[in-house]
Image (spheres, rainbow, N blue to C red):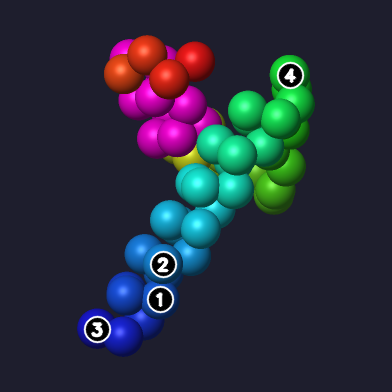
Amino acid sequence: MQVYLQMDIIKQEIEASLLRLAEQYPVVTITSPRQSGKITLYKRVFYENLLRGHF
C-alpha cells in the first residue's frame, strides 16, 4: 500500500512540474526509454488540460 502511495505522489509531482514548465517554455520534451509511458503521461497532463481550457 505504501508503495502505491509513493508512486501517486511522484506522479503528481511530475505532472505539476510538466504543467509549470509548459507555462514557461513553448516546447517541453519528454524523454525516457521506449514503451515507458511517455504518450500516456502526455495525454494525462496536457490533453486533459487542453479540454479544460488551460492552454
Report the Cα–Cα distance between label 4 and label 1.
Answer: 30 Å
Residue 15 x %, y %: 49, 46
Residue 35 x %, y %: 57, 44
Residue 33 x %, y %: 69, 49
Residue highlighted by disc 2: 9
**Residue type for callout 1:** Gln
Residue highlighted by disc 4: 26
Q: Mark 2 and 1 residues: CB-CB less than 8 Å, in contact?
A: yes
On screen, residue 34 versus residue 40, left or right, reads right
* Label 2: element kind: helix
Residue drawn at x 32%, y 75% as measured from the top left? 5
**Residue type for callout 2:** Ile
Q: Is residue 48 magenta?
A: yes
Q: Mark 4 and 2 residues: CB-CB less than 8 Å, in contact?
A: no
Residue highlighted by disc 1: 6
* Label 4: element kind: loop
Label 3 crowding class (10 Å Cα cut-off): few <14, some 14-19, many 20+? Answer: few
Residue highlighted by disc 3: 1
**Residue type for callout 3:** Met
Q: Identify the image quadrant of residue 34.
A: top right
Q: Is residue 40 magenta?
A: no
Where the N terminus falls, by quadrant? bottom left
Q: Mark 3 and 1 residues: CB-CB less than 8 Å, in contact?
A: no
**Residue type for callout 4:** Pro
Q: What stretch of residues is rendered in magenta? A: 42-51
Residue drawn at x 55%, y 36% as measured from the top left? 19
Q: Nearer the viewer, mark 2 or mark 3?
A: 2
